[in-house]
Image (spheres, helix red, strand yellow):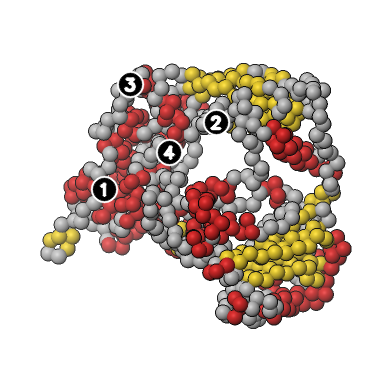
Amino acid sequence: MMGISISSSTSKGTKGGMRFYSWIKWYNPTLLHRAHVLDGRTCHNYLRSPHVDPLSTATPGLPGDEKSDSRIIRDNWIRAQMRLRLDQFATRKPLTLRIGTFNVNGRDPSGSLASFVHGEAKVTDPSTLPDVLVFGFQELDLSSQALIYQATTWKEEMWFTAIMDALESASADYVKLVSKQLVGMLIIVIIRRTLRPHIGDVSSTSSGQGVMWLGNKGGVAVRFRLYDTIFTFVNSHLAAFDDQVERRNADYLELRRALRLHAPGVVPPPGNLNYRIELPDHDIRVLIAEVAAGEGDFNSILEFDQLEAFSLDPENMSNVLEQVTKPIMSITDVVTEITPILAIEPPQTDLGAILFGIPTIHRKTNFTNPGTIACAFRFIKPSENHPLFPSWLTVTPTSGIILPGESQPISITVDLNRETAAVLNKQNHAGMTCRLTIHVEHGKDYDITVSGVYNKTCFGNSLPWLASLPQAIRKVDTSTILEKHDARAPREVIGLIGWLMTHAVHEENLFLASGDVEEVQMIRHCLDTGDDIPSAGGQTMALSVGQTLIQFLNSLTEPVIPWSFHGFAASVKDRDEAYGVRPPFSNGRPVHSSRFALLNVLKILESLPSAAANVWISITAFLHFKLQGADPSKKRMLGKSTADLKMDRRMLTLRISPKAQVFAPVLLRDNLSLLPSNRMSPLVKRAFVMYFLS
């Protein structure tokens, strides 16, 4: 059975600003003209993109290939209509599948495979056993002869016999449907005998990768139709070793090209993909333990998955248990001189007040077909060099067909990211307006005007620029503000921490529990306008101020500890190194003092931008005071035994850890444009923060 491979990060050189791998010219010549896809981020984006035929390039007055576009829009519309009417034309049959993958490392089967074959199901109770079993094996045969003589099946027969033996008496109810082997890769599909009459269109294929394309790496695939649902299963074995992520990406892209099967269908992905989690073994075990204890989630681990972009299409997975009939609708191309027309209501969409970080704004507009023939529409770019929509706007659907007399609702959604907010905050005008163009195939173009008023906010800016403002952001002409490199901490941070120091030092759940949504919005308004934050409000107000501080820090275009500083933070091994200087020695022993610690803090913070250093000092000083200085028991430290002091330190660590867990991913937020191997481990971030709090 396959375990989880874990590795630490590695680095690679670059050539001419782009990664270059000499092996690619021998390994994958079909991609030489598309070498850019081997870049990690580009490849991941490619994997994320929907695999549908793209519409032709079109701009106002230049409609593109209308015949081809009409066909694509029509086909997409038919699929959408079938999904909407699925319950009318489909019956559902329950089906259970068991999918397993096993890198056998050249070994023959030994012992029972019961837990691998049927898990906790009981062979004595056939109703608990799967209907379909799909098993993928890798490294079935490691001999050099296997690369040359690929026709032998004795290894397959050996493992098939072991699978059937694991089913014991229930094996009589199963039959092998199809198998495919290529050197050390094997995929076997076993089904209940009662399903065999309902299965057709069985096929298989393979593609060798690796050295000389002989098949030590690559993939084998099988396809079949069960009732009217198509299933495809692929067993792949991609390039090994920690630092070969780009080669694994190339393997995957080549397999997508080479494994040609008619009507792919549902594709669960068994196999030894060899992708790693870019975290040290210890870190990932701690993070998994936190998930098991209910103190975290898997997102902190998935961020470091080399295969973060690999996922199943949920629309495909929704069809696993469905028997779908053939489409009963179709559209025939008809030669006609009637021009399709479109009515848009309303033609102007008012977004109202727009503020970064506030829940997204949703608006609806309706497209109606008042004509006598079907109307195929699509949104088009304002010009060839512009995106379809501004980065802050999402419109769905972007194309479709409207039958005569029917309507199609169009959803318009505004959601600002940090980068867009930073640009808007620096503009003196508050208007946000864009024109969207809709092209009707074989018809004319129509326009929608989308407009709103942007409210400038201290959220979504860089620290140095925000700290350079002489007043609250809504009281100044921000278009004239230049970033200062010797800026102090922004007034917003000072104001929030000052309020917490006065009103929330003894609030145990500060930063650990959420506040009131309306209070948070009111506090944000105070920060933007320069108004005082009300002192009344009780516990919820304290939690709301704490939550606002976290949101503010998380909204910065670059975290408090800049990305260029993350390499140093990740290399820190102890508290003294975090402070930047080793303590002096006296009689061979280090000398520690609060004054020396302060000098070390100041020394290391000199390397940070001024605003970032001041914010870091303000936040860590407040947390340090809250966790230690405000504790009355600290006044009675003198005279305690060593055991008591150790116990106090353990208790203090327990109090610090939850705060560090909250602030670490915010103060040292990852640069998501980097590959997982170049990001900091969540545990390393926490440790760095704790050095300054302990």
> Does the residue at mark 3 contact the one at mark 1 (Cβ under 8 Å)?
no
Label 1: state its secondary structure. Answer: helix
Residue 115 position by quadrant: bottom right
> Residue at label 2?
384
461 is higher (above) or lower (below) than 174: above
- Sequence-wise first label, 1 or 4: 4
- Sequence-wise first label, 2 or 1: 2
> Residue at label 4?
554
> Residue at label 3?
480
Q: Position of residue 409 (x, y in %)?
A: 70, 27
Q: Position of residue 262 (x, y in %)?
A: 74, 55
Q: Rounded to the nearest whole Å, what is the CA distance between mark 2 and mark 1? A: 70 Å
Q: Amino acid at mark 1?
A: Lys
Q: Judge depth for marks 2 and 1 and give the one in front.
A: 2
Q: Rounded to the nearest whole Å, what is the CA distance between mark 3 and mark 2? A: 33 Å
> Does the residue at mark 2 contact the one at mark 4 (Cβ under 8 Å)?
no
